[in-house]
Amino acid sequence: MARHTARTPATPGVLTDPLRNRGVGFTQAERDELGLTGRLPSAVLTLEQQAQRAYQQLQAQGGDLAKNVYLEQLHDRNETLYYKVLTDHLVELLPVVYDPTVGEAIEKYSHEYRSPRGVFLSIDRPEDVEKAFATVRLGPEDVDLIVCSDAEQILGIGDWGVGGIQIAVGKLAVYSAAAGIDPARTLPVSLDVGTDREALLKDPLYLGNRHPRVRGAAYDAFIETYLRTASAMFPRALLHFEDFGPGNARRILETYGGYRIFNDDMQGTGAITLAAVLSAIKISDVPLREQKVVVFGAGTAGVGIADQLRDAMARDGGGDGGGGGDRRQATARVWLIDKPGLLTRDTPDLRDFQQPYARDPSEVADWTRDDGAISLLETVKRVKPTILVGTSAVHGAFTREVVEAMAEGTERPVILPLSNPASRIEAMPADIIAWSEGKALVATGIPVPPVEHDGVTHQIAQANNALLYPGLGLGTIVSGASKVTDRMLSAAARAVADQVDVGAPGASLLPPVEDLRESSAITATAVVEAAVGDGVATGRPSDPGRAVRQAMWEPVYGPVHGDGATA
Ligand SMILES: NC(=O)C1=CN([C@@H]2O[C@H](COP(=O)(O)OP(=O)(O)OC[C@H]3O[C@@H](n4cnc5c(N)ncnc54)[C@H](O)[C@@H]3O)[C@@H](O)[C@H]2O)C=CC1
Ligand SMILES: CC(=O)C(=O)O
Ligand SMILES: [Mg+2]
């Protein structure tokens, strides 16, 4: 007797395409038109009702990682609904889809994997780069933004191989939720060059290339193939680089400056830190040119920050930040500390980007050394810095002694433990504020609740590049800027700082996350104006503020598109 296998009817394409799917949000007429008759329960819900249900389901998840996984599944099912939930609850959900939970999602990627999102490019098949991009079926005018990562230095948690796709996904979610960049016009990309993490290489479920990281000429050729192909196929796209290792991040940015490229860890982080410093100056009254900056952790982010603070100090001294005496003087107001302690010209194996800041050994000849190294504490005591930046991913590096020495050396020390995720922060704000007796002006990379001290509520600004790069990206897209210039970065930093009122005691140094959409629009407008001023804009809107707001996508159901439609 013939055997009959029960068959589930095939799901219509529109229900499996997250950009078009609305599930029970489709009206009866739309269901008939799209061939969905009888394929959904009878009720029709509004987007608001669907968002309520999704939010209830989200609350039932046990813990932030489970919430992240739930939201990613929603993202893969119905993108409009995902962004509706995310934007309606941005303060609560930003830490779930982004920093710090995204770090955990990346570590567990191969085990929590449900479905692919993004474009996976493998160094073992560079000839497939064009073919892979062709599968997204988007034309040259259809892509505004691509975020890629090779995942060598994810946040402060190191090399996570193909799991790094989730940092690209998370960064794009912030772009769309915070700055209204249309998610249909964005692509997350994994550049899978292998991993040096033994545990991943040995994990039978690991989903990436199972070999050590490829370096040298083959790596460079792969990056070049990516850049050449992406910019030829999608010439309007801004190419955002995220969480590359210190050896590659800056080299790629400098080598390929001719492309429309942006390194978030260097440029975005530098600009948001400059914004926090500009706000702090309004409180401390110490002019920018007189600041003294110690950076602990002189890698991609640390030296990116040093460069932007240095250029801003040089401009404040009367220069253009581009060269000459002011720049030299500003450089001399920055001290870098890395694993060997304070970096001096005779420190072995200095990286090329650290060299400009390395101190003259004669200047520190009588400073105390531990095992030959000049410590952070000794540097703080000697230099009396006004600003201390942490980008080392060393938890607890800002000890009580260090914070007390900062507070002894200057009236209102600016202390910025910027390392992510929470397990890597150099010190918690509650400690910094207590140890400095309420004097320190603090901002952190992760979201931190306010701190009460001596009758003052200190709002802790989130100095995470996410508070700046969405507006910067939107301004770059709206202006059609051919590159991201230094002036666009400093305009973004100023625009962010200008939104802050530091009049009240304990005021935050940066705008709050709940205002991120409005703040991003203001930042984007300043970026468009700077792009026009710098002569790199290819579009010149007569009213930049209006053009920015008109360009911002919102999560609402628009016209429906049947199978075969591209929108
Ligand atoms: N708040 C924000 O927006 C951002 C924060 N970050 C955070 O900054 C941290 C560093 O990130 P990247 O610069 O990309 O990494 P990186 O690897 O390029 O830099 C880290 C640097 O810290 C140094 N370091 C490690 N141990 C040290 C020690 N014991 N003493 C002194 N220096 C030490 C390393 O040698 C390296 O130069 C991460 O935690 C990351 O999450 C990075 C980008 C943006
Ligand atoms: C925020 C960010 O880009 C980082 O921690 O790497
Ligand atoms: Mg990063």
Image (cartoon, rainbow, N blue to C red):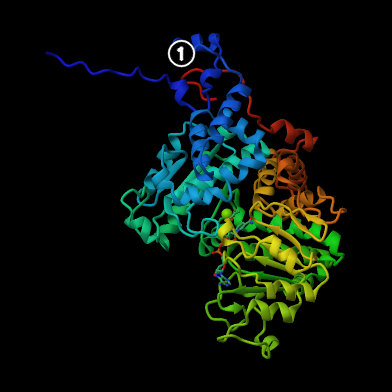
Residue 448 in the figure: left or right of residue 6? right
Looking at the rendering, in which quadrant would you find the C terminus?
top right
Viewer can see residue 419:
yes
Residue 465: image location, x then y, percent: 65, 52
Give the SS element for disc 1: loop
Q: Quadrant of residue 315?
A: bottom right
Which residue does the image show at 43% across and 21% down from the upper left? 13
Residue 337 in the image: above or below residue 264: below
For the point 58% across and 57% down, the residue is: 422
Drawn side of residue 143 relative to residue 531, left or right? left
Give, as a three-letter code, the residue at label 1: Leu
Relative horizontal placement of residue 320, taking residue 228 as reference (left or right): right
| Residue depicted at x 67% and y 78% | 377
Q: Residue furthest bottom?
A: 366
Q: Quadrant of the N terminus?
A: top left
Q: Position of residue 241 (x, y in %)?
A: 55, 51
| Cβ of mark 1 under 8 A from ligand 2 | no
Say few, some or many: other residues with alpha carbon within 10 Å of mark 1 (under 14 / 14 to 19 / 20 or more).
some
Instruction: Name the residue rendered at 61%, 70% in the picture.
Output: 397
Q: Nearer the viewer, residue 561 or 21?
A: 21
Residue 140, quarter of picture: top right
Residue 237 in view (yes/no):
no
Q: Say whether residue 124 is left or right of residue 328.
A: left
Residue 389, position in %: x, y? 68, 66
> Residue 262: horizontal and vertical position, in percent?
61, 51
Above or below, 375 relative to 510: below
Q: Which residue occupies the foreground of this view, 468 or 360?
A: 468
Name the quadrant where ligand 1 sits.
bottom right
- Which residue lies under the disc numbered 1? 36
